[in-house]
Amino acid sequence: MGAYGRLLRYVAAIKNEVAWKVLIGLAISTTYIGQAFAMAKAVSVVFLGGSVSDIAGYLVIALAAVFLRGFLTRLMESYSKVVAAKVKNKIRLLIFDKILRLGPGYLSNKRSGRVQSLVLDGIESLEPFLVYYVPQIITIAISGLVIGFYLTLLDGVTGIIIIIAMMLCVIVPYLTVPLVSRSIVTYWRSYALLNAQYVDAMQGMTTLKAFKASRSKGEELAGNALAFYRQAIRNTTFSLIDSGLMMLLTSIAASVTVAIAAYRTDLGIIPIGAVSAFLFLAAECARPMVDLNNYWHNSFLGLSVAEELFEIVDQELVITERENPDQTSLEQGLPSLQFSEVSFAYQEGEKPALDKVTLDIQPGQTIAVVGKSGSGKSTLVNLLLRFYDPSQGRILMNGVDLKDYAIDYLQQKIAVVFQDTYLFHDSIAENLRMAQPQADDRALKAAAKSAGAHDFIRALPAGYQTVIGERGATLSGGERQRLALARAILKDAPLLILDEATSSVDAKSEALIQKTLESLTRNRTTIIIAHRLSTIQNADKIYVLDESRLAETGTHEELLQLKGVYAGLVDAQRRGNGHE
Ligand SMILES: Nc1ncnc2c1ncn2[C@@H]1O[C@H](COP(=O)(O)OP(=O)(O)OP(=O)(O)O)[C@@H](O)[C@H]1O
């Protein structure tokens, strides 16, 4: 079990905490042993005809052990929670960091609900193994050996029997691993599937309602919920059978030990006083075994989840940075950009999204990229941001290959307004500050004014402090776009990319934004991707993509004269707008 061994490395990372847990665990075991020992002594004294006053001291010790155990158990519980929070947080940060480094390319093939259940519930399920099982097995090994050794001193044969029985209790649960693990893996998969479908349904609620598909989606979810429920029951059944067997085994082990001790006493091999020691201490050997088995069971889900988590940890980074990457070449004036014979396909062997595309953009130019839907326009942006690397050809910025830049440095120098604006469930101010965390309120307002967003923000109940819901759900499409534009303006980067940035705003706002853009693009290199061709007529150069290839290049007038793809697009748009 590879994941099992690798998880132990995470335990090594918290070895001090584990050591403390073992110490507290040993202290708890000592109270049990002390209590059992005192009771064994008391019973021996009574057996040998002693009075209540003769056993008073033992009873006080037993009582003190009970109180001390109560305190230690509480201490152990709260300490375990602190350790658990710490280790889970560490693993979550590790996974989150890796997913961020893998980038959008990795996530585009994953379901958000699946990733969510893995990072939240999945990591949560590692707790029993990391925080409980491992320290418990160390505690048992030490306390069991001590008791076993002591009992062996009392009687070698019975002592060895109890040590063997304890070892069996540790080993036997491993025998049911294949059966139980299969059941738990299925349980986890059905849970993750249900979660993914639920998140999908919630996100697509409006579509489901609009297409009257909510009933059929609901039925599908109910079907999966039932499958999950059945799997959960099956799982519990396996678990109960297994822990029942374990209890039976430990009880048999304790009873057989006591019976053997009693028999050997009867034969006169061991003294009568030793039987009571076996009576109480054999039960003490059995008790932590049952706990251990429970922790083992609870660990199972985590062990199956760990395999998936390690898949992410092991996932090779497609986008890498070279050693000592360039972090200076974008400081020299406005950036130029050269795409030279760039080809790229999202999936190997599939039709390329870009096919031998060559662009030459001079510093400070405003260029436009147009083309039919699916012609590859947004893919250019994905490559510029290094979400993906070209499969062939090179992209140079200021004469340096994008692959030679530090990724953070490169991305800092590019401000993008994406086609599908993403706003977070936070205040407008914080959403804007994502572009520049130190920006003061005046800078926020100036950016919002330039993007034509200030007036609508002011009209909101809490102004810039208004929380706008997930994906900016409480705003209109146009308002979301204006905020995204304000965010890009605030970033103040030398390369500005507008991917359909004004497609959802009304004519009045667009006129205002166009004016802002004119001043904004004056001291920047700008790439505008637009469907509405009226917005890019003044671009220094227009690149026309068709079927992933660069079909035409020129100014608006030059392209119209060509009477090719661009002229066709303009014509189609005019007719669509009723200008014919
Ligand atoms: N993440 C992805 N995984 C696989 N294929 C993708 C992905 N993103 C885009 N594609 C495909 O790549 C091609 C180019 O897509 P791209 O988004 O660049 O087109 P576009 O010109 O920007 O289209 P639109 O104008 O509709 O936004 C399309 O065929 C599209 O289906």
Image: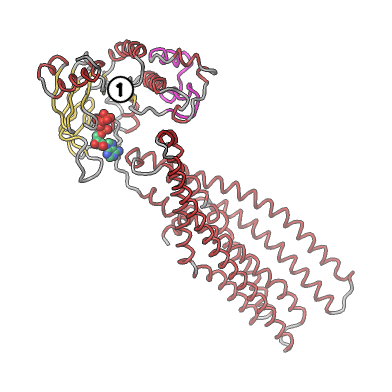
Q: In terms of image quadrants, where is residue 543?
A: top left
Q: Label 1 neighbourhood size at 10 Å, few (<14), some (14-19), many (20+)?
A: many
Magenta stretch contains residue 199: no
What amino acid type should be assigned to the residue bearing mark 1?
Answer: Leu
Outermost residue, bottom direction? 267
Figure quarter occupied by ligand 1 = top left
Residue in the image at 10% along x and 20% along y: 563
Residue in the image at 83% along x and 75% along y: 45
Residue in the image at 89% along x and 70% along y: 52
Q: Which is nearer the eye, 337 or 209?
A: 209
| Quarter containing the C terminus | top left
Q: Which is nearer the eye, 333 or 205?
A: 205
> Residue 97: horizontal and vertical position, in percent?
42, 40
| Quarter containing the N terminus | bottom left
> Residue 346: horizontal and vertical position, in percent?
25, 40
SS for callout 1 = strand
496 up-or-down from 229: above or below: above
Count the marks. Answer: 1
494 up-or-down from 387: above or below: above
Q: Which is nearer the eye, 312 or 397?
A: 312
Q: Where does the magenta region start and end? A: 423-450
Q: Label 1: which residue? A: 498
Colour convention:
secondary structure
Magenta stretch contains residue 427: yes
- Note whether residue 380 is visible: no
Q: Which is nearer the eye, 472 or 247?
A: 472
